[in-house]
Image (cartoon, rainbow, N blue to C red):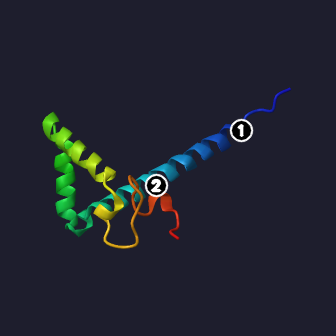
Amino acid sequence: MRKPRDFDSELKALADKAKQLRERRVRDLGALVTATGADALDADVLAGALLDAAANTDKATGEGWRKRGAAFFQRKPRDTANGPGQQPEGTLPFDGGAASA
C-alpha cells in the first residue's frame, strides 16, 4: 500500500519557495537600481519614472529601452565599475545574496 501524501507539508514547502523567490526578486531589483546609479534619485522621482515606464504603450520607446537595458548587461565590468568590486558580465551586485570574497 502506498504512503498517503502530506498535502499540507507540500503546500507549506511551495509557499516557502514562493516567498524565497519574491524576496530574491526584491533583492535583485534593489541591486539593479544600485547598479544603474538610480539609487541617487529621490524615491518619488524613481517611482514616477517606473510608473511612466509601466504605463508606456509606445512599442518603439519600449524597444529602445529594451536595447539600452540589454547593452547595460552586456558591458564589460571595467566599463561599469570604478574599483575592485567589479561584477562579471550580466550579473548584479549581491546577486542571490551570496557573500562576496
Q: Is residue 96 left or right of residue 66?
A: right
Q: Position of residue 28 (x, y in %)?
A: 40, 56
Judging depth in this view, the residue of 87 and 44 nearest the camera is 87
CA separation in Å, label 2 and label 1 = 27 Å
Neighbours of disc 2 within 10 Å: few (<14), some (14-19), many (20+): some
Neighbours of disc 1 within 10 Å: few (<14), some (14-19), many (20+): few
Above or below: residue 91 compared with residue 99: above
Q: Label 1, on which residue?
A: 6
Q: Secondary structure at mark 2?
A: helix
Above or below: residue 37 compared with residue 66: below
Q: Position of residue 99 (x, y in %)?
A: 52, 67
The quarter of the picture where residue 31 lies is bottom left
Judging depth in this view, the residue of 65 and 20 nearest the camera is 65
**Of labels 2 and 1, the one closer to you:** 2
Q: Residue at x 19, y 67 (%)?
A: 42
Judging depth in this view, the residue of 43 and 82 nearest the camera is 82
Three-letter amino acid code at disc 2? Arg
Three-letter amino acid code at disc 1? Asp
Q: Is residue 67 left or right of residue 77?
A: left
Q: Residue at x 19, y 47 (%)?
A: 53
Q: In this rendering, does residue 79 appear at all?
A: yes
Q: Which mark is residue 78?
A: none
Q: In this rendering, does residue 58 appear at all?
A: no
Q: Quadrant of the N terminus?
A: top right
Q: Which mark is residue 24?
A: 2
Q: Position of residue 75 (x, y in %)?
A: 31, 54
- The extreme top residue here reads 1
Q: Residue at x 31, y 71 (%)?
A: 82
